[in-house]
């Protein structure tokens, strides 16, 4: 996991490409991407939600889950290999679990509405949409917190700063050596 | 106060433009060389970078096209906004630290400089520079046109300027933009961004409260009206359906880390450690400003369905009609100034990176060195680029919209598909090769351009941009894995270990 991360990222990306292909080849339904409103120009409507998900619903949800997984994996890729500790993996795993839970609440809430035609509301939106709007927004906040509060531990430690300063010093030395030799010649 | 609505709005916009001009004059005294002009000498503080970053993210599209999209397709377009927390997080995890380190290590002043240093390849530099120039032309033309159309709408509401022409509006708005970009370069750009960002935060917050009070039952009443008319519009995937929504999730979420005008700003902070505060501050600003996007669109759709407001001539009229019907003149003035701020903050960023690509990167890629007296030529090319883009915008408006639409395809999605793998993944994986980078960029451009030219559509609302992005990711890693492992320069190798 720690050193073979790129292979996992590649596998997830390839799987997403395969799902996308399967969706494009799936049997189509009318107005899957919406249609014009019958009375008001400029508005689009979705129409029959059950029909739109009939052939691709599970595939699309899997695509969404893989995308969320990819976001967590790519975030991990941005952390130097030696800092991908069990602690960080736990934080990232927890974040992924939260985002997958939110995606599931959104998808299952939508399906439940399609079955019953009834919905509760939360902060102005139907419950499934509230999971989408507030949940998706807030679901990635742990990633922000890990970055900001874990900056000195996982992203850029004192040791990293010293290494980088040493690189800059080496660059400065090389430049002054080059200038001196230019002057000498 | 209502009797002076137009005068108040014009006053706010004129006041804002005067501020931009004064900032340009101030910044000119601080711009001594091309490093100052393009990356502010890597000397900016965290608040300035945060506001510049988020205000460049939210262009005029966020203030005009965004509410229009919500009005037209409902919750589908929320996905472009709610992924911002993922997008900003990825941008910082993958790009912020490394791009800042390479910039200092190799004295880079542009994104193509960064990729040339990382891959040791002038071919990759050239391809990224060309992608940027094509994207900048399309983006700038649409931004300048949007600015002129809004200005014409404001001025034509007064007696004195009732017959003002679009060309005049293009000239006035472009002149202000060119003036502060030419005189002060990126320093003027980022300091105007600070005010632009602040205006956008205030506008977004005030609009949310106004929108919540349009219906007695608040936002819930608005969404209930929409649900009764067509439930899918206000369900999680909206009228455009699940794959269109997830496509935006992918392209806008991952793609933020591939936007050249944004990640270039990550090279400008004074201290690498500032990134820990820049990330949450940028996200906060974006979320507050984007409230306008969601709230106006929902309320306007409900108001039209409910018969409170007549159907709009165009979905993009949602914001302007909302402002004229539901807000008091002072708030309308702030929001219109915010709209100009949003357009200008994105335009100045594009002018800057486009100019860098033309005078610095393309010559370097072709003849191995950049041109003499870069600062002088940077100013000249900034003027020329803006004039070409403005002419292009007018031509497309009056004669033929095809070309701008085509270059418009080189927008967010193309930048995301061609730049994200090469920069965001490539800066964090030593195994990334030149062949992988060239293949990814080539594939992204071909699919985006090709599907636009041939008018290819995919089923279930799958977009060409999504297909391009997924393909370029797979090919970038796949081709890199099967080609010979690259030999990196020692300083780059050591930097990538940090």
Image (tube, rainbow, N blue to C red):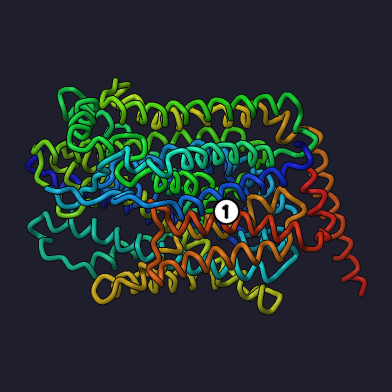
Q: Is residue B413 visible?
A: yes
Rendered-image quadrant of the N terminus of chain B:
top left
B9 in relation to B457, above or below: above
Q: Residue at x 29, y 68 (%)?
A: B171
Q: Nearer the viewer, residue B112 or A13?
A: A13
Q: Secondary structure at mark 1?
A: helix
Decide: few, some or many residues near mark 1? Use Cα within 10 Å; few <14, some 14-19, many ≥20: many
Q: Is residue B178 visible?
A: no
Q: Left or right: where does residue B172 sit relative to residue B104?
A: left
Q: Residue furthest front?
A: A27
Residue for badge 1: B264
Q: Left or right: where does residue B44 sit relative to residue B212?
A: right
Q: Nearer the viewer, residue B160 or B476?
A: B476
Q: Residue at x 66, y 58 (%)?
A: B476
Q: Left or right: where does residue B165 sit relative to residue B292?
A: left
The quarter of the displayed image where residue A148 is located: top right
Please provide percent x and percent y for residue B8: 18, 44
Q: Nearer the viewer, residue A93 or B33?
A: A93
Q: Left or right: where does residue B434 sit relative to residue B356?
A: right
Please provide percent x and percent y for residue A18: 56, 51
B170 in relation to B338, above or below: below
Q: Residue at x 81, y 52 (%)?
A: B493
């Amino acid at each position: 996991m720690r050193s073979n991360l790129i292979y996992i990222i590649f596998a997830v990306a390839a799987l997403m490409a395969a799902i996308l292909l399967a969706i494009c080849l799936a049997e189509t339904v009318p107005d899957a991407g919406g249609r014009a409103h019958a009375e008001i120009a400029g508005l689009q409507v979705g129409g029959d939600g059950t029909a739109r998900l009939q052939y691709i619903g599970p595939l699309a949800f899997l695509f969404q889950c893989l995308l969320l997984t990819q976001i967590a994996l790519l975030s991990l890729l941005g952390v130097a290999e030696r800092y991908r500790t069990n602690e960080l993996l736990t934080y990232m795993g927890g974040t992924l679990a939260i985002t997958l839970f939110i995606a599931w609440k959104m998808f299952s809430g939508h399906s439940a509405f399609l079955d019953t035609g009834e919905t509760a509301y939360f902060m102005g939106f139907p419950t499934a949409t509230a999971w989408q709007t507030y949940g998706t927004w807030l679901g990635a906040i742990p990633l922000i917190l890990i970055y900001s509060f874990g900056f000195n531990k996982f992203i850029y430690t004192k040791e990293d700063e010293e290494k980088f300063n040493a690189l800059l010093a080496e660059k400065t030395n090389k430049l002054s050596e080059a200038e001196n030799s230019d002057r000498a010649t | 106060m209502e009797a002076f609505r137009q005068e108040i709005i014009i006053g706010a916009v004129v006041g804002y433009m005067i501020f931009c001009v004064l900032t340009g004059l101030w910044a000119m005294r601080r711009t001594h060389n091309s490093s100052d002009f393009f990356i502010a000498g890597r000397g900016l503080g965290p608040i300035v970078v945060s506001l510049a970053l988020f205000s460049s993210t939210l262009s005029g599209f966020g203030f005009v096209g965004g509410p229009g999209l919500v009005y037209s397709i409902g919750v589908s377009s929320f996905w472009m906004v709610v992924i911002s927390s993922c997008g900003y997080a990825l941008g910082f995890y993958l790009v912020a630290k490394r791009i800042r380190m390479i910039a200092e290590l190799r004295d880079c002043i542009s994104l193509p400089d960064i990729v040339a240093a990382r891959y040791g390849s002038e071919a990759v530099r050239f391809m990224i520079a060309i992608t940027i120039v094509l994207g900048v032309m399309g983006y700038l033309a649409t931004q300048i046109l949007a600015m002129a159309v809004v200005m014409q709408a404001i001025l034509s509401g007064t007696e004195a300027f009732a017959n003002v022409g679009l060309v005049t509006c293009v000239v006035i708005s472009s002149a202000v933009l060119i003036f502060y970009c030419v005189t002060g370069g990126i320093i003027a750009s980022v300091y105007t961004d600070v005010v632009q960002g602040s205006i956008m935060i205030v506008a977004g917050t005030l609009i949310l409260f106004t929108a919540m009070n349009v219906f007695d039952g608040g936002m819930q009443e608005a969404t209930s009206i929409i649900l009764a008319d067509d439930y899918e519009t206000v369900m999680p995937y909206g009228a455009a359906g699940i794959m269109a929504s997830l496509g935006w999730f992918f392209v806008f979420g991952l793609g933020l880390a591939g936007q050249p005008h944004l990640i270039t700003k990550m090279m400008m902070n004074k201290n690498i450690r500032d990134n820990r505060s820049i990330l949450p501050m940028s996200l906060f600003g974006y979320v507050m400003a984007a409230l306008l996007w969601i709230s106006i669109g929902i309320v306007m759709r409900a108001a039209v369905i409910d018969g409170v407001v007549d159907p709009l001539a165009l979905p993009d009229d949602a914001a302007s009609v909302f402002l004229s019907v539901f807000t008091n003149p002072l708030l309308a003035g702030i929001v219109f100034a915010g709209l100009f701020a949003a357009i200008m903050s994105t335009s100045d960023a594009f002018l800057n990176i486009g100019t860098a690509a033309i005078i610095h990167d393309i010559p370097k890629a072709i003849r191995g060195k950049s041109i003499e007296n870069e600062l002088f030529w940077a100013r000249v090319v900034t003027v020329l680029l803006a004039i070409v883009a403005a002419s292009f915008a007018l031509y497309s408006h009056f004669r033929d919209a095809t070309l701008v639409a085509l270059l418009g395809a080189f927008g967010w999605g193309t930048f995301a598909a061609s730049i994200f793998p090469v920069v965001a993944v490539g800066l964090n994986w030593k195994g990334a090769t030149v062949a992988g980078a060239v293949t990814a960029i080539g594939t992204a451009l071909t699919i985006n351009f090709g599907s636009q030219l041939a008018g290819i559509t995919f089923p279930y609302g799958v977009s060409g941009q999504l297909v391009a992005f997924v393909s370029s990711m797979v090919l970038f890693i796949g081709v890199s894995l099967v080609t010979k492992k690259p030999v990196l320069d020692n300083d780059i190798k050591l930097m990538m270990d940090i």
